[in-house]
Image: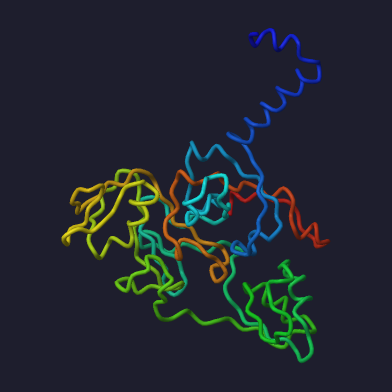
Amino acid sequence: MNLKTIWAHLPEWGKAFLPAIGILLTLHLFILRWVTVRSTSMYATLYPGDLLGVERWPVWTGFNAGDIIVFRDPVQDDRAKSDRQLLVKRIAGMPGDVLELRDGELYINGQPVAAPPLSTSRWTVRLKAGQEAGGVLRALGLPPGFVLSGRSLIDLPLNEQLADELRKRPEVAAVSRHGQEVGSPAHIFPFSPNFKWNNDDYGPVRVPGEGDTVGITPFTLPLYDRIISRYEHNTVEVSGGDLLINGQPATRYIIKQDYYFVLGDSRASSSDSRYWGFVPSDQVVGRAGFVLLNARSVRGQTSKGRSLIAL
């Protein structure tokens, strides 16, 4: 039985249903899909519970610095693509860019880059005696579990505007900004004592791009090891003091695809490229183009769906 015969025997509802499914699949794969924000890493640009419209076509047409992208968690690359968590961050460094954070300020190719307008940093809020954080969290659009109950000193992602709003609340005694981070914690990428970086003082580091030739030495290997072995599927080993890639001694490696360096707008609450490195271009799902359903509206607070492209 050929396709034409099968189609002729389908009921009318089936003939209408199959094209509709085809259109939906095409939209999902090539044009638009939806994701829900789960974390506070993009606060207050995005709120937990926001429903995002993710534009698929930039995967083929290209992204720009400052775009908010949705991508598969690079650390979960031992799982099937469909099983990996989707993350939402902002592109800070494009392929070929030299990125640096100095005292929490972003520099690209030596030039300062203004922080996104709604971005936040870490602040400490002191509550008055006997007060709980629930009202403060609701006012900020943060989930109830963001702060443990019974705490009088709480760390929150705020900016100047949000801090001023909290100072007016009756349960708040004081609001103060955290100082810059010091030291070089071991959990910062690339996890090497040769790179004495932290959340606020990071780099300079060059974001790899397709066709780049990078030198491979004991000093630089921590930057590129995951790219070579996990993202681009080569074997890396040391034998007799030599570094071997696919069994051959190597002092250089040619990057096979573009990579991005991403940051959360709430940098103090964001697990991003500072913690696990570069995002492979083949793991990017699309660009967050607009908020269809805003979590604050659902909670009864004044807020509207909005475009994200101009941020």
Residue 182 on image: x %, y %: 43, 81
Q: Is residue 219 or residue 81 the one in the foreground?
A: 81
Residue 244 on image: x %, y %: 22, 53
Classify residue 131 by image quadrant: bottom right
Of all residues shown, which one is farthest toward the bottom? 129
Classify residue 184 by image quadrant: bottom left
Residue at 58%, 34% (x, y): give it. 30
Residue 260 on image: x %, y %: 43, 52
Residue at 50%, 63% (x, y): give it. 114
* Left or right, residue 153 beside residue 30: right
Q: Relative to 144, does residue 227 appear above or below in the rendering?
A: above
* Left or right, residue 150 beside residue 254: right
Residue 290 on image: x %, y %: 66, 48
- Labels in figure, total: 0
- The C terminus, quarter of image: bottom right
* Colour scheme in use: rainbow
Q: Is residue 41 or residue 167 the one in the foreground?
A: 41
Of all residues shown, which one is farthest toward the left? 240
- The N terminus, quarter of image: top right
Q: Relative to 248, does residue 196 appear above or below in the rendering?
A: below
Residue at 44%, 75% (x, y): give it. 103
Classify residue 6 by image quadrant: top right
Residue at 19%, 54% (x, y): give it. 251
